[in-house]
Amino acid sequence: MNVPKHLMNGYRVLDMTHVLAGPSATRLFAEMGAEVIKIEFPPDGDITRALPAIKEGRSAYFAQQNRGKLSVCLDVKTEEGKQVLRDLIKISDVFVENFAPGVIKRLGFSWDDVKAINPKIIMCSISAFGQEGELSALPGFDYIAQAYSGIMGMIGEKDGPPMFPMAGIGDVMTGAHAACAVGFALLHREKGGEGQYLDISLLDSYMHCHELNLQVYSAAGIETTRSGHHHWAVCPLGLFKGKDHYICIIALQPQWPGVCKAIGRPELIDDPKYSTNEKRLENSAEVIEIVQFWLDLQDSDESILAALESERVPCAPVLSIPEVINHNHMKERGCGQKDQRSEVRRGGGSRHAAAVFRV
């Protein structure tokens, strides 16, 4: 049987990560063809093995981020286990860990230790706040870094409390940042460079997500605030009430004429009250009311979307999770509901230093 070739065929990645950020990074390597060996501690392994949904004794959360990896149950608190890890480091290209700063050093596998074993290896540490700095020693997860980054403070109604999205945006994004950094470090090595140590944090990654908030404050002293269903800097840009769903409509200056045509109000295109984004922001309540009035007159969400799409106005219904999973586009792209199960076998626990199985 011919095995398909992928970009990272022939690379070996040691994955001493758990939960989401680290496993997201190493999952990307597995999907690109690398041999990923996930190292878990006895007796329970990655805590996501116990997270819902549990089906036939297996966690979908765990399988989602660890499919395609090999797994080693390894007690690195024993000398026997430490030696197994040293032997694996010698023959690996990448070593990824996401313990709290200082833990990996106490286990005897700091960058200096790892580099002495394999000078060509790329070591990547993923944490909430980074390996250095005032906050580095604090425990943290996605939403903690999101709170410190100011992103959480930008979500919600203007006069209401901040909110957080029910998604691991920071964890998965940080995993992608880590994978990208490791890829470039490997490229550097392929060009004759040595191994490298990479310090990747959720907080740093979240700081990349600010579109306007940081730059308008640092450059112009403008402090932005939460703005609820509608954007504070572009009008119209926000969530409008459709028949069955909220509808997200985004109209930058080039799309404004399309909005006016779609809602049957072409005279608004050159109306001095609405002709520029600045003018529309000054009269945002009126603009929102005009668009919402048109939506209220429509027969269905489908007719709303058809009218806007015909004028090339970016728009989308706010879908539920079942609607997302069963959407034809998602299925065609390979991320929707599948009938077949992926073939994944779960291994049992082990009292030995190392037990290998495929997850």
Image (spheres, rainbow, N blue to C red):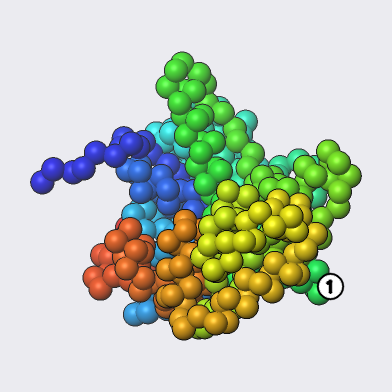
In the image, taking residue 58 as reference, residue 255 lies left or right, namely: right
In the image, taking residue 102 as reference, residue 77 lies left or right, namely: left
Closest to the observer: 301 or 5? 301
The answer to whether 225 is drawn above or below residue 201 in the figure is below
In the rendered image, the residue lying farthest to the top is 192
Indicate the position of residue 277 as horizontal and vertical percent values: 71, 52
In the image, taking residue 359 as reference, residue 180 lies left or right, namely: right
Indicate the position of residue 168 as horizontal and vertical percent values: 57, 62
Q: Residue at x 62, y 78 (%)?
A: 293
Q: Residue at x 41, y 58 (%)?
A: 66
Answer few, some or many: residues within 10 Å of disc 1's Cα (few below 14, many 20 plus, some between 14 and 19): few
The C terminus lies in which quarter of the figure?
bottom left
In the rendered image, the residue lying farthest to the left is 1
Closest to the observer: 97 or 106? 97
What amino acid type should be assigned to the residue bearing mark 1? Asp
From where the camera sits, is residue 342 visible? yes
Indicate the position of residue 358 as horizontal and vertical percent values: 32, 58
Q: Residue at x 80, y 50 (%)?
A: 135
From where the camera sits, is residue 250 visible? no
Closest to the observer: 250 or 307? 307
Residue at disc 1, secondary structure: loop
In the rendered image, the residue lying farthest to the right is 221
Q: Residue at x 34, y 80 (%)?
A: 56
Q: Which residue is mark 1?
A: 159
| Picture quadrant of residue 286 | bottom right
In the image, taking residue 141 as reference, residue 75 lies left or right, namely: left
The answer to whether 10 is drawn above or below residue 195 in the figure is below
Indicate the position of residue 9 as horizontal and vertical percent values: 30, 37
The answer to whether 350 is drawn above or below residue 124 in the figure is below
